Image: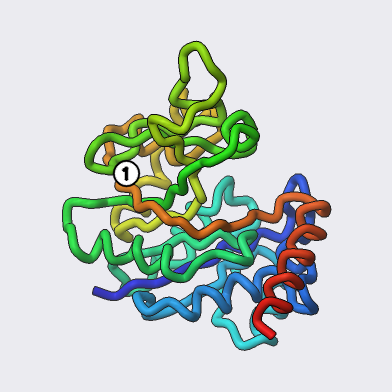
Amino acid sequence: MKTIGVIPARFGSTRFPMKVLGQIGGKPLVRHVWEKACLCRQLDEVLIACDHDEVFKTARLFGAQAVMTDPHHPSGSDRIAEAVKEREVDVVVNIQGDEPFIDPAAIDALAVLLKQDAAILMATVIKEISCEADFLNPNVVKCVVDGQGNALYFSRAPIPHHRGKTFALTPKNYKHLGLYAYRKSFLIEFTRWPKGALESAEELEQLRALEHGVRIKTTVTEHESMAVDTPEDLQKANAWYAKLKSATK
């Protein structure tokens, strides 16, 4: 079962244009993501899906396989669908291009889920929330799951609601890390569906799958990651990278 990891590298990010080329420890952000993905054991191939010549050239310079895609795609899933449409692959893993510290083991865990269970069309990664600030932060997407680890809902609001208090450790609270794995055939179909009411309200594309009755399997990671959405986040990423480098000396 051939599995490909695709990194959608959007040049014109709304909150932070050109962020995929932002420097962390002397390397562009997208290179850090690619290097992490290349450590995965379950991926047969790693591809960067670009929408700008500068990103394409940079990716090729550091040795990555890259393809150009339509700059007008509304989401990373649409960009990835175009990138893999003509490729002979079975499982596609969407690796966010703005998470330089992503855990390769989490990527592999997603791929394994789809390889082991033919009924799973889509899977994603969640992490337990341990602090109230993350639980209340609308930029941190929350997820609630059923007893089998299937996503029930995703929201920017604090869910589940803890009656009588703002935050509690029981039941467990999870945040969504934004990694996805799909069967290629499902991904192509998914990107053809129109936005539903829930997706439009929350601006979370995974809700489109739930609105169509598609089960999204989750896997839990203990590894902390960090998305770079703003110039301030890039500064934090550089500080985190420096700390990691000094710890390994």
So how many labels did they put on this image? 1
Quarter holding the C terminus is: bottom right
Above or below, 156 against 188 in this view is: above
Look at the image and tell me whether residue 180 can be seen: yes
Q: Which residue is mark 1?
A: 216
Q: Residue at x 44, y 58 (%)?
A: 81
Residue 128, how many percent across, how many down? 46, 44
Above or below, 86 against 178 in this view is: below
Q: Residue at x 82, y 52 (%)?
A: 232
Closer-to-camera residue (43/54): 43
Residue 13, how many percent across, how many down? 72, 51
102 on left or right of 109? right
Look at the image and tell me whether residue 194 can be seen: no
Residue 193, how many percent across, how many down? 39, 39
Above or below, 22 against 119 in this view is: below
Closer-to-camera residue (49/244): 244
Closer-to-camera residue (142/10): 142
Q: Residue at x 32, y 71 (%)?
A: 89
The colour style of the image is: rainbow
Closer-to-camera residue (229/64): 229
Residue 169, how many percent across, how many down? 46, 33
Label 1 residue SS: strand
Question: Label 1 neighbourhood size at 10 Å, few (<14), some (14-19), many (20+)?
Answer: many
Quarter holding the N terminus is: bottom left
51 on left or right of 147? right
**Residue type beneath disc 1:** Ile
Q: In which quarter of the view is residue 105 placed? A: bottom left
